[in-house]
Amino acid sequence: MPAGEVLSQAHSGRSANITPVSTDCFSCTLSKSVTLTSFVYAFYSNWFFKIELNIIGFFARMPSSDQQATELLQGLKNNFSAWELEYRDEQQLVMADKLGATKQWFMVKQINSSQTILYFGSAIMPRVKPDGTQAKPPVIFKLLGGFHQWYSKALLSAAVKKLMGNLK
């Protein structure tokens, strides 16, 4: 994780004051200046992530659209599909799923006027028992670890391609 990241820190909402069980971070350096808004929009509106959004829309009845992503990024909404805004500044955005099980994290770091590092990561949040103690995460998170890494890299790649004008 890069210095200054906020994914592993506590924020407001369902997962306030709870440390994630695990976090990951993937990055890519682009030879162009990219804003956080442009990065997150490219991520949420690319064809590959829309597969996940369509599944969530159908099974969880949480539809989404490019317009909703725009409204989130303009500060007009605090949610998008199955996620709620947890933290945002000019360089970072953290979205927590509505069940409190996972988080998505986006960060941009300008190297100079023509280079940007894009970061994408996620966190698995612990389950909290009724007595307030921390339970182990569901086994499914462990079983899907290898797939999750591949999928996260593919999502970042699709967003990068969209930012570079090579993908819809």
Image (cartoon, helix red, strand yellow):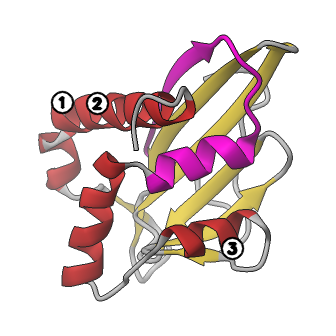
Circle 1: residue type: Gly
Relative to 45, 33 lies left or right = right
Element assignment for label 1: helix
Relative to 51, 40 lies left or right = right
Comparing labels 2 and 3, the label whose residue is closer to the camera: 3
Give coordinates of residue 93: x percent, y percent.
69, 51
Element assignment for label 2: helix
Relative to 46, 35 lies left or right = right
Q: Is residue 7 visible?
A: no
> Which residue is at a point 19% across and 42% down the rendered structure image?
142
Chain part drawn in magenta: 20-45
Give how far apart the Cα atoms at labels 2 and 3 are: 29 Å
Q: Is 57 or 14 nearer to us in this picture?
A: 57
> Which residue is at a point 80% across and 39% down the rendered structure image?
91
Instruction: Categorize mark 1 by other alpha carbons within 10 Å: few (<14), some (14-19), many (20+).
Output: few
Residue 149 image label: 2
Q: Is 43 or 93 nearer to us in this picture?
A: 43
